[in-house]
Amino acid sequence: MASKDLFEPLTFRNGRTARNRVALAAMTNLQSHADGALSDDEHRWLKLRAEGGFGVITTCASHVTQDGQGWDGELGIFDDRLLPGLTRLATTLREHGAVSMVQIFHGGARADARLIGTRPWSASEMESDPANPRAATSEDIERVIAAFRDAAVRASRAGFDGVELHGAHGYLLGQFLSATGNKRDDAYGGSLENRARLMREATRAVRAAVPASFLVGMRISPEDMAQSKGLDLDENLTLSGWLADDGIDFLHVSLWDSFANTKKRPDEHPIPLFRRALPADVPLLVAGKIWTRAEATSLLEQGADALALGRAAILNPDWPRASRDPAWQPTRPPATPDELRARGLGETFVNYMRRWKGFVADEAR
C-alpha cells in the first residue's frame, strides 16, 4: 500500500481536492439560534478552524426537517430562510481555503418532542424508548427523502462544497438500518437490503439533485456501539459497497476509538476492512480519539485516507498547521473556560463541554 502524507492533498471521488488530509469532524455545539439560523458564535468557531489549516470543515449535524431537530441551538438547513447564514458561513470557509460541508440529518426517535412540538417518529414504534416514537408512515419516508435532497440543494446554493449524510450515532438513517430497532414488515424492514433502503434512497436522491462537482458522503457507525444499536460489522461492510454504487464521494466511519479492533472480530482492525470494502477512488475518513500527528499517520498507514478530529480540534484550532512540526504536542484537556473561549467556543459550547468528564476545569492548570 502506497504511503500517504498527512499534508498532501486529498482527492475525492468526484475530483474535488482538499489541501490536506485533516478534517474537522461534525460536532454538536448548541450555538445556533433557536430558529436554526447561524449565530456569530458558530461562525467564529468554524472560521478559526479554517484559518488553522483544516482541509475539510464539516458543520454540526443540521436538521433537514423541523421534526428532525435533536437539541437546542441546532443549525438548521430545512428552509430557504436559513440561506443567508449558511451562505455567510460557506463564503468564509471558502475564503480561508477549506473544503466546506454541511452534515445533514434527521433525529428520528432522538428528535426532541419539546422542540419539534409533536411525537418523534422512527422506523418502528418503540414503547420501551422514553421518547415513545411512532412508526413512520410511507408519507413520512417520502417526505424525509425529499427533505435530504432539498437540504443538499440548499447547501449547494449557499456555496458549500458538499454534504455528509449522518447515518451514524443512532439517528434516523441508522434507526432504519438497525436489526433490533427496525421491526417493519414492508420494503423498509427485515433484510439488510430493506433496512438500508432509506439510507440508500436518500443518498441517491441527493446525488441526483446536485452537480457532479458537489461532494456527497455518508457517515456511519461500524457496528453495534453506544446509541448505534442493532448494527453488524459485516452488514456495514456490504453497505459501504452499496453506498459507493449509489454515488458517494467518500465514506466517513465514526470509530469512537480509532485504535481499537472490532468487537465482532477482536483480532482485526476496522480500517483495513472498510478500505477493502470500498472502491479505490472513494476515500475513507475515520474519527475517534486522534490527538497527535504520529497517531494520525499510523491510521493512514492502516488504510485510512483522511482523519476527522473532534476534541483535539476543540483545543487546537490550528492543529493542521502546528502539527507540521514533528516535535509539537497538542493541548489536551482539561481546559479552563477562558482557554476554551480563546479557542473560539461561545459560552453555550463551553457549558456543553462540561458534560464531557474531565474536559473543562474551572481552575487554571
Image (tube, helix red, strand yellow):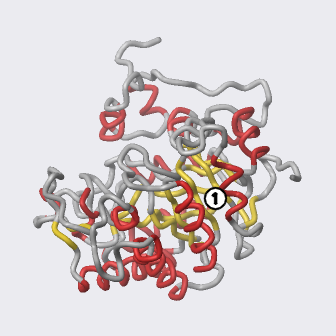
Left/right of residue 163 with respect to residue 52 in the rendered view: left
Indicate whether 112 appears above or below 312: below
**What's the residue at 87%, 52% (across, down)?**
1
Q: How many marks?
A: 1
Query: Label 1: how many residues lie within 10 Å, few (<14), some (14-19) or many (20+)?
Result: many
Left/right of residue 59 with respect to residue 13 in the rendered view: left
Residue 88: percent from left, percent from top:
46, 66
Residue 87: percent from left, percent from top:
46, 70
- Quarter where residue 119 is shown: bottom left
Residue 316: percent from left, percent from top:
58, 34
Q: Secondary structure at mark 1?
A: loop
Residue sitting nearer the eye, 353 or 340: 353
**What's the residue at 43%, 68% (across, down)?**
86
Residue 187: percent from left, percent from top:
35, 82
- Quarter where residue 289 is shown: top right
Residue sitting nearer the eye, 257 or 328: 257
Q: Which residue is mark 1?
A: 98
Report the amino acid beneath label 1. Answer: Ala
**What's the residue at 82%, 47% (across, down)?**
5
**What's the residue at 42%, 72% (across, down)?**
191
- Quarter where residue 211 is shown: bottom right
